[in-house]
Image (tube, rainbow, N blue to C red):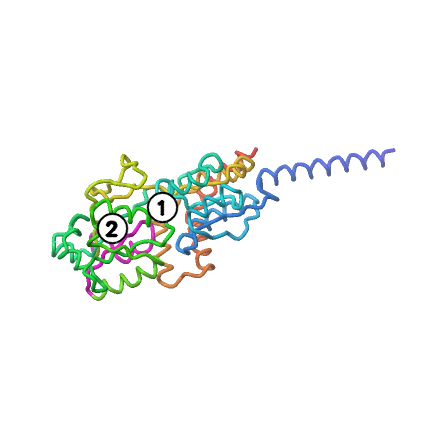
Protein backbone atom coordinates (compact mmCIF):
# COMPACT_ATOMS: atom_id res chain seq x y z
CA UNK A 1 0.00 0.00 0.00
CA UNK A 2 2.81 2.37 0.93
CA UNK A 3 4.55 1.54 -2.30
CA UNK A 4 1.43 2.39 -4.30
CA UNK A 5 0.91 5.58 -2.31
CA UNK A 6 4.48 6.65 -2.86
CA UNK A 7 4.15 5.90 -6.56
CA UNK A 8 1.13 8.18 -6.86
CA UNK A 9 2.81 10.89 -4.79
CA UNK A 10 5.85 10.85 -7.05
CA UNK A 11 3.68 10.75 -10.17
CA UNK A 12 1.61 13.73 -9.02
CA UNK A 13 4.75 15.65 -8.10
CA UNK A 14 6.32 14.90 -11.48
CA UNK A 15 3.17 15.99 -13.29
CA UNK A 16 3.03 19.18 -11.22
CA UNK A 17 6.62 20.02 -12.12
CA UNK A 18 5.97 19.19 -15.78
CA UNK A 19 2.90 21.40 -15.85
CA UNK A 20 4.80 24.22 -14.16
CA UNK A 21 7.62 23.94 -16.69
CA UNK A 22 5.12 23.83 -19.54
CA UNK A 23 3.38 26.95 -18.24
CA UNK A 24 6.71 28.74 -17.85
CA UNK A 25 7.70 27.78 -21.39
CA UNK A 26 4.36 28.98 -22.75
CA UNK A 27 4.79 32.29 -20.92
CA UNK A 28 8.34 32.79 -22.24
CA UNK A 29 7.58 31.48 -25.74
CA UNK A 30 4.02 32.64 -26.49
CA UNK A 31 4.58 32.22 -30.22
CA UNK A 32 5.62 28.58 -30.05
CA UNK A 33 4.13 26.58 -32.91
CA UNK A 34 2.97 29.64 -34.85
CA UNK A 35 4.44 30.30 -38.28
CA UNK A 36 4.96 33.94 -39.28
CA UNK A 37 5.54 35.21 -42.81
CA UNK A 38 7.24 38.63 -43.11
CA UNK A 39 7.12 40.70 -46.29
CA UNK A 40 9.78 43.30 -47.07
CA UNK A 41 10.79 45.50 -50.03
CA UNK A 42 13.13 43.96 -52.57
CA UNK A 43 15.96 46.42 -51.84
CA UNK A 44 18.56 45.01 -49.47
CA UNK A 45 19.15 48.38 -47.79
CA UNK A 46 15.80 48.04 -45.98
CA UNK A 47 16.42 44.52 -44.66
CA UNK A 48 18.25 45.63 -41.48
CA UNK A 49 15.21 46.70 -39.43
CA UNK A 50 13.38 43.59 -40.64
CA UNK A 51 16.12 41.35 -39.25
CA UNK A 52 15.77 43.05 -35.86
CA UNK A 53 12.02 42.47 -35.89
CA UNK A 54 12.42 38.83 -36.94
CA UNK A 55 14.99 38.20 -34.19
CA UNK A 56 12.51 39.42 -31.58
CA UNK A 57 9.67 37.27 -32.88
CA UNK A 58 11.97 34.23 -32.89
CA UNK A 59 12.92 34.99 -29.28
CA UNK A 60 9.19 34.83 -28.50
CA UNK A 61 8.99 31.36 -30.02
CA UNK A 62 7.51 32.18 -33.42
CA UNK A 63 8.68 30.19 -36.43
CA UNK A 64 9.62 33.03 -38.77
CA UNK A 65 9.61 32.06 -42.43
CA UNK A 66 11.94 33.46 -45.08
CA UNK A 67 10.56 36.92 -45.93
CA UNK A 68 8.66 37.47 -49.13
CA UNK A 69 9.82 40.42 -51.22
CA UNK A 70 7.75 42.80 -53.31
CA UNK A 71 7.13 46.43 -54.22
CA UNK A 72 5.12 48.45 -51.72
CA UNK A 73 1.68 48.32 -53.37
CA UNK A 74 1.91 44.52 -53.71
CA UNK A 75 3.16 44.31 -50.12
CA UNK A 76 -0.01 45.93 -48.83
CA UNK A 77 -2.18 43.58 -50.89
CA UNK A 78 -0.32 40.54 -49.55
CA UNK A 79 -0.83 41.72 -45.96
CA UNK A 80 -4.49 42.48 -46.62
CA UNK A 81 -5.18 39.06 -48.14
CA UNK A 82 -3.24 37.17 -45.48
CA UNK A 83 -0.50 36.03 -47.87
CA UNK A 84 1.94 37.65 -45.40
CA UNK A 85 1.64 38.49 -41.72
CA UNK A 86 3.73 41.60 -41.04
CA UNK A 87 6.07 44.23 -42.40
CA UNK A 88 8.12 47.03 -40.87
CA UNK A 89 8.26 49.10 -44.04
CA UNK A 90 5.03 51.10 -44.34
CA UNK A 91 5.69 54.83 -44.73
CA UNK A 92 2.58 56.20 -43.05
CA UNK A 93 1.86 59.09 -45.43
CA UNK A 94 3.89 58.20 -48.52
CA UNK A 95 2.28 54.76 -48.85
CA UNK A 96 -1.20 55.72 -47.64
CA UNK A 97 -2.70 55.33 -51.13
CA UNK A 98 -1.34 51.77 -51.34
CA UNK A 99 -2.61 51.03 -47.82
CA UNK A 100 -6.11 52.34 -48.41
CA UNK A 101 -6.54 50.68 -51.80
CA UNK A 102 -5.51 47.32 -50.31
CA UNK A 103 -8.20 47.49 -47.61
CA UNK A 104 -6.76 49.85 -45.02
CA UNK A 105 -7.81 49.40 -41.40
CA UNK A 106 -10.46 46.89 -42.43
CA UNK A 107 -7.89 44.18 -43.12
CA UNK A 108 -4.63 45.50 -41.64
CA UNK A 109 -3.40 47.25 -38.52
CA UNK A 110 -0.65 49.82 -38.06
CA UNK A 111 0.82 48.78 -34.72
CA UNK A 112 3.82 51.00 -34.09
CA UNK A 113 6.19 53.68 -35.33
CA UNK A 114 9.41 51.81 -36.01
CA UNK A 115 11.18 54.91 -37.35
CA UNK A 116 9.84 58.42 -36.73
CA UNK A 117 10.95 61.59 -38.47
CA UNK A 118 12.00 60.23 -41.86
CA UNK A 119 12.65 62.76 -44.63
CA UNK A 120 12.39 62.94 -48.41
CA UNK A 121 13.17 65.64 -50.90
CA UNK A 122 15.40 67.01 -53.63
CA UNK A 123 19.09 67.83 -53.31
CA UNK A 124 21.77 69.44 -55.46
CA UNK A 125 25.50 69.80 -54.95
CA UNK A 126 26.41 72.71 -52.69
CA UNK A 127 29.06 74.06 -55.07
CA UNK A 128 26.51 74.70 -57.83
CA UNK A 129 23.90 75.95 -55.35
CA UNK A 130 26.32 78.54 -53.97
CA UNK A 131 27.74 79.59 -57.34
CA UNK A 132 24.35 80.24 -58.97
CA UNK A 133 22.25 81.07 -55.89
CA UNK A 134 19.96 78.06 -56.37
CA UNK A 135 17.69 77.48 -53.37
CA UNK A 136 14.31 76.39 -54.77
CA UNK A 137 12.72 74.07 -57.31
CA UNK A 138 11.40 77.29 -58.86
CA UNK A 139 14.95 78.08 -59.97
CA UNK A 140 14.83 75.03 -62.25
CA UNK A 141 12.19 76.75 -64.38
CA UNK A 142 14.99 78.89 -65.80
CA UNK A 143 16.44 77.11 -68.86
CA UNK A 144 19.95 78.36 -68.11
CA UNK A 145 19.79 76.86 -64.58
CA UNK A 146 18.15 73.61 -65.69
CA UNK A 147 20.85 73.15 -68.33
CA UNK A 148 23.50 72.97 -65.61
CA UNK A 149 22.08 69.57 -64.62
CA UNK A 150 21.74 68.23 -68.16
CA UNK A 151 23.65 64.96 -68.50
CA UNK A 152 22.39 63.80 -71.93
CA UNK A 153 22.50 66.98 -74.01
CA UNK A 154 18.77 67.64 -74.42
CA UNK A 155 18.94 70.93 -72.52
CA UNK A 156 16.73 69.74 -69.64
CA UNK A 157 17.82 69.03 -66.07
CA UNK A 158 18.18 65.32 -65.35
CA UNK A 159 16.65 64.50 -61.99
CA UNK A 160 17.69 61.16 -60.51
CA UNK A 161 14.35 59.84 -59.30
CA UNK A 162 12.61 56.68 -58.10
CA UNK A 163 11.98 53.10 -58.98
CA UNK A 164 8.74 52.57 -60.90
CA UNK A 165 6.11 51.47 -58.38
CA UNK A 166 7.51 53.42 -55.43
CA UNK A 167 5.34 56.04 -53.74
CA UNK A 168 7.92 58.76 -54.43
CA UNK A 169 7.61 58.16 -58.18
CA UNK A 170 4.01 59.39 -58.09
CA UNK A 171 4.90 62.48 -56.04
CA UNK A 172 7.86 63.46 -58.20
CA UNK A 173 5.74 63.23 -61.35
CA UNK A 174 3.05 65.30 -59.64
CA UNK A 175 5.58 67.93 -58.53
CA UNK A 176 7.04 68.32 -62.02
CA UNK A 177 3.59 69.16 -63.34
CA UNK A 178 2.35 71.16 -60.33
CA UNK A 179 5.47 73.37 -60.15
CA UNK A 180 5.63 73.93 -63.91
CA UNK A 181 8.88 72.03 -64.42
CA UNK A 182 7.77 69.74 -67.26
CA UNK A 183 9.59 71.82 -69.90
CA UNK A 184 12.91 72.01 -68.05
CA UNK A 185 13.22 68.85 -65.91
CA UNK A 186 13.25 65.14 -66.79
CA UNK A 187 12.46 62.53 -64.12
CA UNK A 188 14.94 59.69 -64.67
CA UNK A 189 13.50 56.56 -63.07
CA UNK A 190 14.82 53.03 -62.80
CA UNK A 191 16.89 51.11 -60.28
CA UNK A 192 17.46 53.89 -57.74
CA UNK A 193 20.79 52.82 -56.30
CA UNK A 194 22.25 52.12 -59.77
CA UNK A 195 21.12 55.59 -60.86
CA UNK A 196 22.62 57.10 -57.71
CA UNK A 197 25.94 55.36 -58.36
CA UNK A 198 26.09 57.26 -61.65
CA UNK A 199 24.99 60.47 -59.90
CA UNK A 200 27.74 60.14 -57.28
CA UNK A 201 30.31 59.43 -60.01
CA UNK A 202 29.16 62.61 -61.77
CA UNK A 203 29.53 64.55 -58.51
CA UNK A 204 33.04 63.15 -57.99
CA UNK A 205 33.94 64.42 -61.47
CA UNK A 206 33.00 67.91 -60.30
CA UNK A 207 29.76 68.09 -62.30
CA UNK A 208 26.44 69.46 -60.97
CA UNK A 209 23.96 66.86 -59.68
CA UNK A 210 20.21 66.94 -58.98
CA UNK A 211 18.53 64.01 -57.26
CA UNK A 212 15.69 62.79 -55.08
CA UNK A 213 16.70 61.16 -51.81
CA UNK A 214 15.43 60.14 -48.41
CA UNK A 215 16.78 59.57 -44.94
CA UNK A 216 17.62 56.98 -43.65
CA UNK A 217 19.96 55.43 -46.17
CA UNK A 218 23.67 55.41 -46.98
CA UNK A 219 23.67 58.29 -49.45
CA UNK A 220 23.34 60.73 -46.54
CA UNK A 221 26.71 59.44 -45.33
CA UNK A 222 28.41 59.90 -48.71
CA UNK A 223 26.87 63.21 -49.81
CA UNK A 224 26.51 65.06 -46.53
CA UNK A 225 23.90 67.79 -46.23
CA UNK A 226 25.35 71.33 -45.95
CA UNK A 227 28.80 69.99 -46.82
CA UNK A 228 28.54 68.33 -50.22
CA UNK A 229 24.84 68.89 -50.96
CA UNK A 230 21.86 71.03 -49.93
CA UNK A 231 18.10 70.49 -49.84
CA UNK A 232 16.09 72.34 -52.50
CA UNK A 233 12.99 74.04 -51.19
CA UNK A 234 9.56 73.47 -52.73
CA UNK A 235 7.69 76.72 -53.53
CA UNK A 236 4.65 75.42 -51.63
CA UNK A 237 3.17 72.10 -50.51
CA UNK A 238 1.33 70.27 -53.28
CA UNK A 239 0.79 66.52 -52.87
CA UNK A 240 -1.18 64.21 -55.16
CA UNK A 241 -3.45 63.20 -52.27
CA UNK A 242 -4.60 66.79 -51.86
CA UNK A 243 -3.74 66.59 -48.15
CA UNK A 244 -1.54 69.66 -48.08
CA UNK A 245 -1.90 70.41 -44.37
CA UNK A 246 0.76 67.86 -43.39
CA UNK A 247 4.14 68.97 -42.06
CA UNK A 248 6.62 69.23 -44.94
CA UNK A 249 9.15 71.61 -43.38
CA UNK A 250 12.52 70.60 -41.98
CA UNK A 251 14.98 73.11 -40.50
CA UNK A 252 13.01 75.96 -42.01
CA UNK A 253 12.78 74.52 -45.53
CA UNK A 254 9.67 73.14 -47.20
CA UNK A 255 10.94 69.87 -48.67
CA UNK A 256 7.70 69.26 -50.58
CA UNK A 257 7.23 65.81 -49.02
CA UNK A 258 5.53 65.01 -45.73
CA UNK A 259 7.88 64.52 -42.79
CA UNK A 260 6.92 60.89 -42.32
CA UNK A 261 7.27 57.86 -40.07
CA UNK A 262 7.81 54.21 -40.92
CA UNK A 263 5.20 51.94 -39.35
CA UNK A 264 5.02 48.30 -38.36
CA UNK A 265 1.91 46.86 -40.00
CA UNK A 266 0.24 43.45 -39.60
CA UNK A 267 -2.54 41.48 -41.18
CA UNK A 268 -5.52 42.20 -38.93
CA UNK A 269 -6.46 38.58 -38.30
CA UNK A 270 -2.87 37.67 -37.47
CA UNK A 271 -2.59 40.61 -35.09
CA UNK A 272 -5.80 39.75 -33.24
CA UNK A 273 -4.73 36.12 -32.82
CA UNK A 274 -1.15 36.94 -31.77
CA UNK A 275 -1.13 39.69 -29.13
CA UNK A 276 2.49 38.96 -28.19
CA UNK A 277 3.70 39.55 -31.75
CA UNK A 278 1.59 42.69 -32.02
CA UNK A 279 2.90 43.98 -28.68
CA UNK A 280 6.51 43.38 -29.71
CA UNK A 281 6.14 45.00 -33.14
CA UNK A 282 4.40 47.99 -31.59
CA UNK A 283 7.54 48.76 -29.56
CA UNK A 284 10.37 48.13 -32.02
CA UNK A 285 12.12 51.37 -32.92
CA UNK A 286 15.34 51.94 -34.86
CA UNK A 287 16.72 55.44 -35.35
CA UNK A 288 17.23 56.78 -38.85
CA UNK A 289 20.86 57.49 -37.91
CA UNK A 290 21.42 53.83 -37.00
CA UNK A 291 19.91 52.58 -40.25
CA UNK A 292 21.86 55.10 -42.31
CA UNK A 293 25.08 53.97 -40.61
CA UNK A 294 24.24 50.33 -41.33
CA UNK A 295 23.45 51.15 -44.96
CA UNK A 296 26.83 52.84 -45.29
CA UNK A 297 28.49 49.60 -44.15
CA UNK A 298 26.63 47.86 -46.96
CA UNK A 299 27.80 50.44 -49.48
CA UNK A 300 31.37 49.82 -48.28
CA UNK A 301 31.14 46.09 -49.02
CA UNK A 302 29.37 44.47 -46.06
CA UNK A 303 26.29 43.76 -48.13
CA UNK A 304 25.63 40.02 -47.99
CA UNK A 305 22.61 38.59 -46.20
CA UNK A 306 24.97 37.22 -43.56
CA UNK A 307 26.44 40.71 -43.09
CA UNK A 308 22.99 42.24 -42.62
CA UNK A 309 22.01 39.57 -40.09
CA UNK A 310 25.26 40.25 -38.21
CA UNK A 311 24.60 44.00 -38.25
CA UNK A 312 21.16 43.34 -36.75
CA UNK A 313 22.61 41.15 -34.00
CA UNK A 314 25.26 43.77 -33.22
CA UNK A 315 22.54 46.41 -32.98
CA UNK A 316 20.52 44.20 -30.62
CA UNK A 317 23.57 43.61 -28.41
CA UNK A 318 24.22 47.33 -28.16
CA UNK A 319 20.54 47.93 -27.28
CA UNK A 320 20.09 44.76 -25.23
CA UNK A 321 18.24 46.23 -22.25
CA UNK A 322 15.74 48.01 -24.49
CA UNK A 323 15.30 44.93 -26.71
CA UNK A 324 14.72 42.70 -23.67
CA UNK A 325 12.12 45.12 -22.32
CA UNK A 326 10.20 44.83 -25.61
CA UNK A 327 10.23 41.05 -25.24
CA UNK A 328 9.12 41.19 -21.61
CA UNK A 329 6.21 43.46 -22.45
CA UNK A 330 5.18 41.10 -25.24
CA UNK A 331 5.31 38.12 -22.89
CA UNK A 332 3.22 39.94 -20.30
CA UNK A 333 0.66 40.81 -22.97
CA UNK A 334 0.15 37.14 -23.81
CA UNK A 335 -0.61 36.10 -20.23
The residue at the far front in this view is 183
Q: Image quadrant for the C terminus?
A: top right
On the rendered structure, is 1 left or right of 41? right
How far from the left and from the top, in percent, is residue 298? 38, 59
Q: Is residue 26 visible?
A: yes
Helix, strand or loop for disc 1 = loop
Q: Is residue 111 visible?
A: no
On whether residue 219 falls in the magenta region, the answer is yes
Up-down relation of residue 91 to residue 132 (above or below): above
| Image disc number at residue 156 | none
Q: Mark 1: few, some, or many residues within 10 Å (few <14, many ≥20)?
A: some
Helix, strand or loop for disc 2 = strand
On the rendered structure, is 275 left or right of 238? right
- Along the line of sight, which residue is nearer the eye, 31 or 324? 31
On the rendered structure, is 273 left or right of 171? right
Instruction: Please give the residue where the numbered disc 1 appears in the rendered image.
Output: 287
Which image quadrant for residue 155? bottom left
How far from the left and from the top, in percent, is residue 173? 29, 49
Residue at position x 23%, y 56% from top? Answer: 210
Instruction: Please give the residue where the numbered disc 2 appears in the rendered image.
Output: 122
On the rendered structure, is 304 left or right of 200? right
> For the magenta stretch, what is the residue range?
206-227
Which image quadrant for residue 22? top right
Up-down relation of residue 207 to residue 54 (above or below): below
On whether residue 269 falls in the magenta region, the answer is no
Q: Nearer the viewer, mark 1 or mark 2?
A: 2
How far from the left and from the top, in percent, is residue 180? 20, 47
Q: Image quadrant for the N terminus?
A: top right
Amino acid sequence: MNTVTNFYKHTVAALTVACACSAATAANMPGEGVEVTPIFPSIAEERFRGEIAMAGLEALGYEVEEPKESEYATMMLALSYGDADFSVHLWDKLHDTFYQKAGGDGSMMKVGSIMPGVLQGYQIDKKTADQYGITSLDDLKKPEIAKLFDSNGDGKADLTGCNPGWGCELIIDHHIEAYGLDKTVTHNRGSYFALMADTIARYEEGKPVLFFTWVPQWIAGVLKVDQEVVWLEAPYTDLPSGDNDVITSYQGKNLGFAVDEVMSVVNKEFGMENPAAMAFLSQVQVSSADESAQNLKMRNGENSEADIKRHAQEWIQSHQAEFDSWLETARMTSK
